[in-house]
Amino acid sequence: MRRSGQVGPVALLPDLQRRLIPRILERVKGNQVKAAQILGISRNTLRGHLRPPEEKP
């Protein structure tokens, strides 16, 4: 049981993605394939995270 005000790890994912993805892309000089490999996701999944919220299905 969680105490009120505590956030679970799944709730933290969007914030982590928002901060981590740009850093990794900078590190690999924009190479989406390399960034996806580092993150352990497919390039298409990475591209989905890069889309603006209004373009997401």
Image: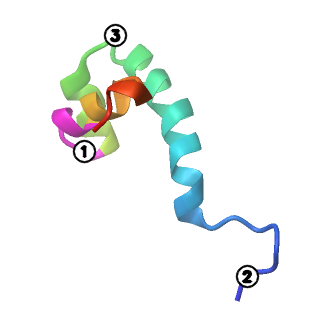
Q: Which corner quadrant holds the N terminus? A: bottom right
Task: Answer few, some or many: residues within 10 Å of disc 2's Cα (few below 14, many 20 plus, some between 14 and 19).
Answer: few
Q: Indicate the colouring scheme.
A: rainbow
Q: Is residue 5 left or right of residue 40?
A: right
Q: Nearer the viewer, mark 2 or mark 3?
A: 2
Q: Earlier in the sequence, mark 1 or mark 3?
A: 3
Rounded to the nearest whole Å, what is the CA distance between mark 1 and mark 2?
Answer: 30 Å
What range of the chain is rendered magenta?
40-45
Tell me, yes or no, whether the highlighted magenta stretch contains residue 57: no
Q: 32 or 38, which lies in front?
A: 32
* Residue topped by disc 2: 2
Residue located beneath label 1 in the image:
41
Q: Residue at x 73, y 82 (%)?
A: 2
Q: Position of residue 17 (x, y in %)?
A: 48, 39
Disc with the residue nearer the chain's start (2 vs 3): 2
Q: Amino acid at mark 3?
A: Lys
Q: Position of residue 37 (x, y in %)?
A: 23, 37
Q: Nearer the viewer, residue 27 or 52?
A: 52
- Disc 1 marks a residue whose amino acid type is Ile
**Residue 21 sits above or below residue 30 on the image:** below
Q: Quadrant of the C terminus?
A: top left
Q: CA distance from mark 1 to mark 3?
A: 18 Å
Q: Estimate the spatial distance between the alpha carbons at disc 2 and disc 3, rounded to whole Å.
A: 41 Å
Camera-side mark, 1 or 2 = 2
- Residue at disc 1, secondary structure: loop
The answer to whether mark 1 and mark 2 are in CB contact below 8 A is no
